[in-house]
Amino acid sequence: MSQLKSTHQTLTKRISFDEFDEIVNPPKQTVDFDNIINAVISRRQALKVVSIAGASAGMFAFMHATPFSFNNAQAKEILLDFKEVSANALDTITVPENFKWDVVVSWGDPMWSKGKDFDHKTAGTFESQLLSFGDNNDGMFIFEHKGKTILAVNNEYVNNDLLHYANPSKKPENENDIKKNKYAHGVSIVEIENKSGKWKIVKDSVFNRKVTPDTDIEITGPARGHTLLSTDADLRAQKVKGTFNNCASGKTPWGTYLTCEENFNGYFMSSDANEKVSAEFKRYGINTKDWGYGWGKYDDRFDFSKVPNEPNRHGYIVEIDPTKPDSTPKKRTALGRFKHENAEVVLTNDNRVVVYLGDDERGEFVYKFIADTKYDPKKDNSNILENGTLYVGKFNDDGSGSWLVLDEKSTGMKKAEICVHTRQAGSKVGGTTMDRPEWVASHPHKAEVYLALTNNTNRGKSEAMPINAANPRADNKYGQIVRWTPENADHANDKFKWEIFLLAGNPKVHANNNAGSKNINTDNMFNSPDGIGFDSRGGLWIQSDGNYSNKGDYEGQGNNSMLYADPQTGKVKRFLVGPIGCEITGLCFSTDKKTMFVGVQHPGEDSSGSHFPGTKDSIPRSSVIAVSKKDNQAFL
Ligand code: FEO
Ligand code: CA
Ligand code: CA
């Protein structure tokens, strides 16, 4: 989700969601900035790291001194050879000259033949939206089943000014508008097929399905049945309606889809403006005002003065079997409740299931989950994610790290409480506050894990968010990617070594640490890494969700883009540039490795002027695109 959203702007002045949440939940008092830097520098000196002039430069030197620096003469050339694409501000997709792209599906495309084609005058009705692909596509994965290809795609949120374009207010104005708004959220599952070299959705496929904010979902795991999740409609806390703000995703070895509930807080409000907001709610940014969605005006579940526990029933990982269209999705409370970004699933050396999880808010944590039950391909694995142990990441300044267990002993909280108030548990044991953890990606050929930290303009401004080696820049506008290797190359271990893989920046504008790390130059520079993922060759794809003003600190960076990085050499090249106002988010690969599916989210947000993928009279529409080589060779 981008930092500036039109839904939110209808509510208040142009501020980011994080800023909005911080008004609700202010960080601790601002401290003397120099003292923070001095504290970090003295630790640096203790490590005998060469310090260049100034505190920030000292941090910068350290980053190139960490354990597995890629800066070596033996470095191999980048894995995939292509001519780098230049930054641009065009209203289209730009790919290297020997590649091509097509639209697979866009917001509002009918999934069944009884649905209507997208109406650019009205942006559709609730009836048409219920039969159509949702808005703001994000994380996605491919599932092969009985010779069919099924694509499961998150529809994260909506832009009110586009969805309700036909309303004079450009906002939802009545109950039908709220239904339309809801049905544009959730998960769209579609069968796709490649006909004459173009991937298209298969209308009326038995696998086509919409999981919406009103779909019945089973609550599983430690928080199932707990009073914190009990409501009048579901006293026993076993069934919840819906999933929404589904950001990125995961895929399990047993063939299910994990959809991750991120900014769930923004949908809740209180019709009683004097309703007390608990400390627990505040930690999650829940406020008496919502972010402009307005659902609580027509659906009491979203009004916490009427249904006080409903917010505790959201903010989880939801497991869906895309091959069983009638199956009930399951909320996996064991994986914790926070603003979930994605769910990267790996196996330990003895086949236990590990899920790495980011909590995308300034100063929140990265988590690891280890399931109690081992994965066994010969058995039914469908409930492996029901129980397990959560850990929070601690990144020490000397390049070591550990996973701190969240259990009754370490937190003083009951297991179910840890699963509902996971952020509080993470704070109790001293997790490292991070610069907005977005996607986690695991290298396909070795135990090495990458984490995108998108940006954090509050870093270094308060005691709650001091500069540290993993989050080394105050007022971090550009973001970084951190990687770690677990001890003994086994994800089961609670110790790891880490380093910064890249520090995004702008070497055209800055000569200090805001220029970025050594592998960033004026050709490949970008800001705000968000989606990341590996292809089978071990190449790292990086998607950006940043400032696309192309001015000031961002001069020369153009629209949001997608880059390709070689983990071995650290070399980074721009592969794709998106249209105006979009973020690039969501990627997965066809089984034959010939097609990369890429998400183009919210082109034209904030009236930025896009008509993508149409022409001048079109409403801009989020879309899944297919990128392939012109010679149709495998490249992934
Ligand atoms: Fe939905 Fe943190 O991105
Ligand atoms: Ca983002
Ligand atoms: Ca994201």
Image (cartoon, grey):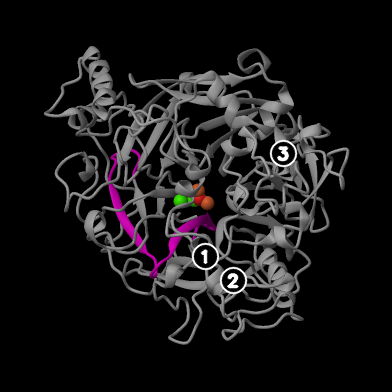
Q: Is residue 239 left or right of residue 549?
A: right
| SS at circle 3 | strand
Taking the spot 83% from the left edge, 57% from the top edge, the residue there is 326
The amino acid sitting under disc 2 is Lys
Q: Secondary structure at mark 2?
A: loop
Q: How many marks?
A: 3
Vertical order, 597 against 73 (above or below): below
Disc 2 to disc 3, C-alpha distance:
33 Å
Residue 391 lies, with reference to residue 527, above or below; the image says above
Tell whether label 2 touches label 1 (CB within 8 Å).
yes
Q: Position of residue 582 (x, y in %)?
A: 43, 65
Helix or strand or loop: what does disc 1 sit on?
Answer: loop
Q: Nearer the viewer, mark 2 or mark 3?
A: 2
Q: Which residues are magenta?
A: 566-595
Residue 332 - label:
3
* Residue 387 left/right relative to 520: right
**Amino acid type at image mark 1:** Thr
Judge: label 3 CB < 8 Å from ligand 1: no
In the picture of the structure, the residue carrying the numbered disc 1 is: 10
Amino acid type shown at disc 3: Arg
Q: Does residue 460 sit above or below 115 in this rendering? A: above
Left or right relative to 72: residue 493: right
**Residue 391 coordinates in the image, percent (x, y):** 58, 24
Mark 2 sits near ligand 1, with its Cβ under 8 Å away: no
Question: Which residue is the site of mark 2?
Answer: 171
For the residue pair 230 and 71, the one nearer the viewer reads as: 230
